[in-house]
Amino acid sequence: MNLYEAIFLRQSVRQYSMTAVAPELLKRIGSFYEQIKPLFPGIKTEIGLVENTDGKWRAGGIFGIKAPYFLTFYSEVRDRAEMNAGYICGQLSLFMMTEGLGSCFIGTAGLREIPSVRADKKLLMVLAFGLPKGPLMRRAGDARRLPVSELCVYKEAPKRWMTQVIEAARLAPSYKNSQPWRFVVVGRRIHIFSKKEGMDKPKKWSEFSFGVMFSHIAVASEELWLEVDLIRLENVSQKNFRNNQYVLSAIVKEQGENAE
């Protein structure tokens, strides 16, 4: 299984065997993190590991998640830092699945033993992971997600690879499964919007969720031999939309092809 295949089968795992995994596997997770190209390269990040195979800690209080390991993600506090964190953590979660590990994003609350700051960086996310007690994967098609017809508008008949990229984006996990994204596809351009309800008071973890969704676009594009560039188009950002707020645009093209 590769990262792209994991997109379609991954589920959030909330019950774990407290069995320790091989140290080599934990090292591979660290090595994979080092290889990820961040969404915004200028933001410094680092990860840490909290071992909990004795079951001493439970994230989120008495009814929270008990996992054998917690990956901690720290970042500089800068514009788009949470989106960048989601982009990196999304790929880490997919990689864990390819290694037979379940995972679940649990935010930053409920583990007082984890420092909230590390040097000049702030704790932005904790990822519970380990060997699952139940199924690692969901069945294909079982994801509780809105259909493409409610999330995306195609202005013209799309190429097959574009529909595959949109499907990968649709399956991205989000805070409380809120699926805050909406897409408008024009040729090779995906204009990405956020639902405007509550945008004056941004929903918790919305920016992080968008980062995870962008990671799915990146993984799908790499698998399909596509090139993707995320940009902000001023001619779109200056328009007033009643129900949505513009975030970014993704220009997707086949390798070696000139952008429109």
Image (cartoon, grey):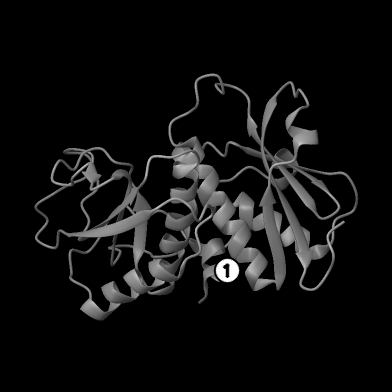
The percent position of residue 105, horizontal first and vertical second, equals 37, 49
The percent position of residue 135, horizontal first and vertical second, equals 38, 64
Residue with the most extreme right position: 156
Please tell me whether residue 216 is drawn above or below residue 147 in the rendered image: below
Confirm whether residue 111 shows in the render: yes
Among the 4 quarters of the image, the one containing residue 32? bottom left
Residue at the (42%, 62%) spot, across then down = 92
Residue at the (34%, 76%) spot, across then down = 28
- Say left or right for 134 vs 254: left
Q: What type is the residue that disc 1 sits on?
A: Tyr
Front-most of residues 180 and 79: 79
Q: Helix, strand or loop at disc 1?
A: helix
Confirm whether residue 139 shows in the render: no
Please tell me whether residue 134 is drawn above or below residue 198 in the rendered image: below
Classify 10 Å Cα crowding around label 1: few (below 14), some (14-19), many (20 and above): many
- Residue named by callout 1: 4
The percent position of residue 4, horizontal first and vertical second, equals 57, 68
Among the 4 quarters of the image, the one containing residue 69? bottom left
> Which quarter of the rendering shows the C terminus?
bottom right
Among the 4 quarters of the image, the one containing residue 141? bottom right
Residue at the (29%, 41%) spot, across then down = 108
Residue at the (75%, 54%) spot, across then down = 251
Task: Say how many tags the image has.
Answer: 1
Please tell me whether residue 103 is drawn above or below residue 192 in the rendered image: below
The percent position of residue 204, horizontal first and vertical second, equals 43, 31
